[in-house]
Amino acid sequence: PPPGGGGPPAGEKDTIDSELLRKYIFAGHVGEYMEVMEEDDEEGYKEMFAKYLEADVTSENMEETWQGVYDKIRESPAQVLTKKTKDQKRKSKKATKLSAPQRRDRVAQKIASHLAKLDA
């Protein structure tokens, strides 16, 4: 065990669950989630897995798909850089600060809106 007691309890060996490892390597956990989403929330499933569905990847053929990907990587392991189609610059999500008069005006608008709702 590593110093500081971060390892397994005394007497237990480090064992690797090969089935669990294989499931994660071949995205079995994603396939299981796909099945759950498909049953529970059809619209959310179609939105979340749109790229998978475009590529005809389903929870049933997930392992075969990833096996094909790994085979292609083994055939040509050199990294191939691709040209990006869209501008990849990140957009800032932080809103710009309002000045004091702008904040006061915003509060006044909110108050007026709230009073209008109460009158209606």
Image (tube, rainbow, N blue to C red):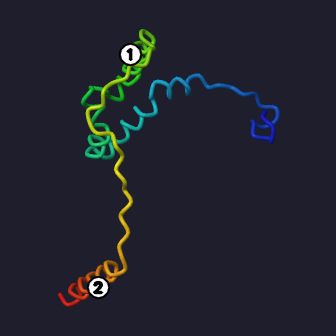
Q: Please state if 59 lies on the left or on the right of 10 as rendered.
A: left
State the residue at coordinates (29%, 85%): 108
Q: Please state if 97 lies on the left or on the right of 115 as rendered.
A: right
Give the quarter of the image for residue 63. Answer: top left
Q: Please state if 50 lies on the left or on the right of 29 as rendered.
A: left
Nearest to the eye among marks 1 and 2: give it: 2
* Depth order, front residue of 1/13: 1
The residue that mark 1 highlights is 68
Under tag 2, what secondary structure?
Answer: helix
Under tag 1, what secondary structure?
Answer: helix
Rounded to the nearest whole Å, what is the CA distance between mark 1 and mark 2? 61 Å
Q: Which mark is residue 108?
A: 2
* Residue 16 % position (x, y): 65, 25
The count of marks equals 2
User: In the rendered view, would you say 87 is above or below 108?
Assistant: above
State the residue at coordinates (46%, 33%): 29
Disc 1 marks a residue whose amino acid type is Gly
* Residue 117 % position (x, y): 22, 84
Neighbour class for label 1 at 10 Å: few (<14), some, many (≥20)?
few
State the residue at coordinates (35%, 42%): 37
| Quadrant location, the C terminus | bottom left
Q: Earlier in the sequence, mark 1 or mark 2?
A: 1
Q: Please state if 104 lies on the left or on the right of 9 as rendered.
A: left
